[in-house]
Amino acid sequence: MSSLENTRDPRSIQRVVIRLLKWLGAPDQAELSRSFATWFNEVFVPRQGNPEQVPAFQDLQEVDSMLQETVQKWYKEAEQKGKKEGKKEGEKEGLVKLILSQVEAKFGKISSADRKIVRAAETETLLEWGARIITAETIDEVFDR
């Protein structure tokens, strides 16, 4: 149990549970297996921070398949989140390059201070600046200063 209490990542938890399954797999260990399942559900899972993501079970044998499904779900969610964040970062980087290119094409070389301002801007601000470039007569009008 101390191995489980010191484990946070789902794959490590699964490895510890597999070892426990081997140890508790004998028919004469059924009561201990149920006791462990109760401890896992009532003590271990709530300490993990997302107890709603780990379904309760009655028997230790259920844990391995449950953890396999949960681990797959967590990795899929992390992958989707990473893709979404990567897409947002890519879109922002594209806007930064576009704004810098348009400003330099219209007003000449841009200062390093203005480059930093553009790189630090949020996506919505970059979109606003992109629209202002069309009608602005000075770089200050683009950046609304």
Image (cartoon, rainbow, N blue to C red):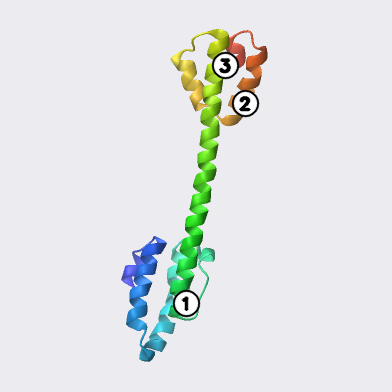
Q: CB atoms at circles 1 and 3 under 8 Å apart?
A: no
- The residues tagged by marks 2 and 3 sit, at their Cα atoms, a distance apart of 12 Å
Which percent across, then down, holds residue 58?
A: 49, 80
Q: Residue at x 57, y 16 (%)?
A: 102
Q: Residue at x 60, y 8 (%)?
A: 138
Q: Earlier in the sequence, mark 2 or mark 3?
A: 3
Q: Amino acid at mark 2?
A: Leu
> According to the image, label 1 marks what residue?
62
Toward the right, the furthest residue is: 135
Q: Which element is circle 3 on?
A: helix
Tally of marks: 3
> According to the image, label 3 marks what residue?
102
- The residues tagged by marks 1 and 2 sit, at their Cα atoms, a distance apart of 52 Å
Q: CB atoms at circles 1 and 2 under 8 Å apart?
A: no
Against 87, residue 47 (above or below) is below
Q: Residues within 10 Å of mark 1 (few under 14, many from 20)?
A: few
Q: Which element is circle 2 on?
A: helix
Q: Residue at x 38, y 61 (%)?
A: 8
Q: CB atoms at circles 2 and 3 under 8 Å apart?
A: no
The C terminus - image quarter? top right
- The residues tagged by marks 1 and 3 sit, at their Cα atoms, a distance apart of 60 Å
Q: Judge left or right: residue 128 versus residue 62.
A: right
> According to the image, label 2 marks what residue?
127
Q: Amino acid at mark 3?
A: Gln
Which percent across, then down, holds residue 11?
A: 39, 63
Q: Amino acid at mark 1?
A: Glu
Q: Earlier in the sequence, mark 1 or mark 3?
A: 1
Against 75, residue 69 (above or below) is below
